[in-house]
Image: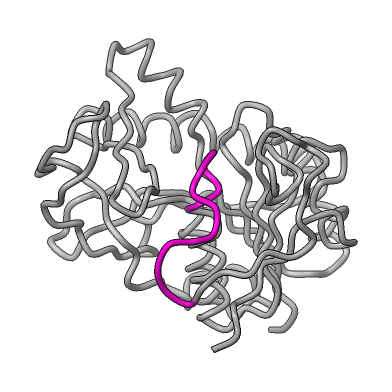
Amino acid sequence: MHDILVVKCGGNAAVRSEAICADVAAVHRGGRPVVLAHGGSADIDRLAERLDVPSRRLVAPDGVSTRYTDESTLEVVQLALAGSVKPRLLAALRASGADAVGLTGLDAGLLVAARKPAHRALLDGRRIMVRDDHCGRIVAVNGDLLSTLLTAGLLPVVSPPAVAEDGRVVNVDADRVAAALAGAVRASTLVLLTGARGVLADRYDEESVLPVCRVPRRGAPPVVTGGMAVKLIAARDALLSGVRRVLIADGRGPRPVQEALAGACTEVLLEEA
C-alpha cells in the first residue's frame, strides 16, 4: 500500500477537530489511506481540573516540557482520550462519510513503550528526582494491525496510552505516537496539526512562519518553547524512520490537511550529516 498519509490532530483548545475530521474524511474518500493520531491536552486539563487532579509539567535538562503523569494523572489521561476525545473524533468522521476505528496503544499491543526510568527534572522551578512518572518511549508498533485496517478501507484513529514492557499502562507523547505510526506503515507524509501556522521564527509573531526548519539528527531541537520542541523531535523520529515529508501546520483553518499538503506549513528536514 503506497502514499499513506498520517495526520496528527493537536490537543490545543484552538485546534478545530471537526474541520480536521472533515478534511481527513475527504482525503480518505478520495482513495488515499489515512491514519489519524490524536492527543487531547486541553481535554485532559479540563477533566483534571474537574476531578481536582493537579496538572504539572516537567522540564528536562534539554528544555523540553512534558506532562507529569503520576497515577492519578494517568487515570485522567485515559478517561479524557478514550472516553471523550476519541468518541468525538469518531462521530465527526462518521458524519463526514469515513468508516473509522478507534484504538489506543493498548489494543492488540498496538504501541509498546519502554518505561521512563527515574530521572532528574525541573518541577515548578525546583530540581527533583522523579520516580513516579508513568511515561514511556515507544519502542514497537503493531504495523500489521494498522495495515489490516487500511487494506479493509478503514480509517484508524489512534491515541495514547501504550503498554509498557512490564505489561502496565504508560502515557506516551501523541506527536511521537504519530511519528511511530508513520514509520510503521511506511507513510509518505506526516502532517502535525497544531495551534500555530507552523514553526515560528518569533513565537509572538504569527507571520514569522519558517517555510523550512532543519533539525539535528540528535540532541536538542532548534526551538524548545511553546510545545514546539516535542513536535520537532517527533518530526525527526519520522524522518529517521523513512517518512519522506513531515509538515507542521495550522489546525485552526477550514481545510487544514489539504492546505498543509498544498504548502501552508513548515516542512521539517534533517540537517546534513
Say if 136 sits above or below 150 in the image.
Answer: above
Residue 214 included in the magenta stretch of the image: no
Report x, y in % for residue 116: 20, 56
Total labels: the figure holds 0
Q: Which residues are magenta?
A: 217-229
Say which quarter of the image contains residue 185. bottom right
Say if 160 sits above or below 217 in the image.
Answer: above
Which residue lies at the image location 60% right of the left edge and 77% below the top edge?
A: 270
Report x, y in % for residue 112: 30, 65
Which residue lies at the image location 69% right of the left edge and 55% below the top edge?
A: 248
Say which quarter of the image contains residue 147. bottom right
Which residue lies at the image location 79% right of the left edge and 69% below the top edge?
A: 32
69 sits left or right of 244 in the view: left
Residue 225 included in the magenta stretch of the image: yes
**From this viewpoint, which residue is outermost toward the front?**
202
7 sits left or right of 208 in the view: left
Report x, y in % for residue 71: 18, 33
In the rendered image, the quadrant that contains the C terminus is bottom right
Say if 150 sits above or below 258 in the image.
Answer: below
- As rendered, which of 108 and 126 lies closer to the eye? 126
In the rendered image, the quadrant that contains the N terminus is bottom right
226 sits left or right of 73 in the view: right
- Magenta-highlighted stretch: main secondary structure? loop
